[in-house]
Amino acid sequence: MSAAEERILDEKLDRLRGVAGEGPDRTPGNRVAPGDAERPEIYREDPERRRIEFSERELNGLIARDPALAGRAAVRLSPGQVSASFRVDLPEEIPLFGGRRLRVQTGLQLLTRDERVQARLVGVSVAGVPLPDAWLGGLKGQDLLATSGLAALGAGIEALQVDDGRLDLLLAP
């Protein structure tokens, strides 16, 4: 990613983290320097600031920033689905497959239904072999945000849409 693309991505991440500030001498995405005195301001919410869009390129750039994931993980955004590929190095001690690198792929259907964000597991493949639902604990087709500790994550998102190469989020008020 270019320096300009990196800067835009950092601003989006700052908005998600709640780090960015706005005010007379601050612009969106700029952090307040240590020692700067905070000035009292009237609290306002701009509904448009709750909309955040990530491109596939930005998400893969974010993955590439992590040394443990760089070159080992990638995402693909297609209408209604996020697909991810991972390369996993198996420890030498594992019988038959020890010391080998496996490719793991997964698909997750992301959507907003009945005013609630849902994440449904489409499937998982290891070395190109789709795993049976029974081996995945019966999670295929299940809303993972409703069946796990991730419910709070879903509650923080009012709506989302996945299109070809783009993920649009609308954060909850």
Image: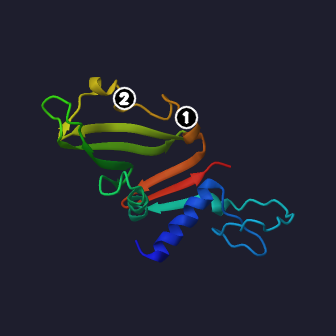
Reading the chain from its start, which is encountered first: label 1 or label 2? 2
**Residue type, mark 2 in image:** Leu
Q: Is mark 2 on a helix, strand or loop?
A: loop
Q: Residue at coordinates 69% horizontally, 73% vertically from top-left? A: 27
Q: What element carries label 1?
A: helix
Residue at label 1?
151
Residue 72 lies, in percent from the top left, at 30, 52
Q: What residue type is labelled 1?
A: Ala
Residue 124: which quarter of the image? top left
Q: Is residue 26 above or below residue 13?
A: below
Mark number for residue 105?
Answer: none
Q: In this view, does 43 lie above or below 138?
A: below
Image point 41% across, 55% down: which residue?
Answer: 66
Judging depth in this view, the residue of 173 and 124 nearest the camera is 124
Q: Tell which of 67 and 173 is nearer to you.
A: 67
Q: Where is residue 48 in the image (x, y as percent from the top left)?
A: 64, 63
Residue furthest out toward the front: 93
Residue 90 position within the rendered picture, expressed as x and y whole percent measured from the top left: 23, 38
Query: Dot 1, crowdedness within 10 Å: few (<14), some or many (≥20)?
Result: some
Q: Are marks 1 and 2 in contact (CB under 8 Å)?
A: no
Q: Quadrant of residue 70?
A: bottom left
State the CA–CA distance, disc 1 to disc 2: 15 Å
Name the quarter where the N terminus is drawn: bottom left
Which residue is depicted at the point 47% across and 53% down?
161
Left or right of residue 49: residue 130: left
Q: Residue 139, labelled with which disc?
A: 2
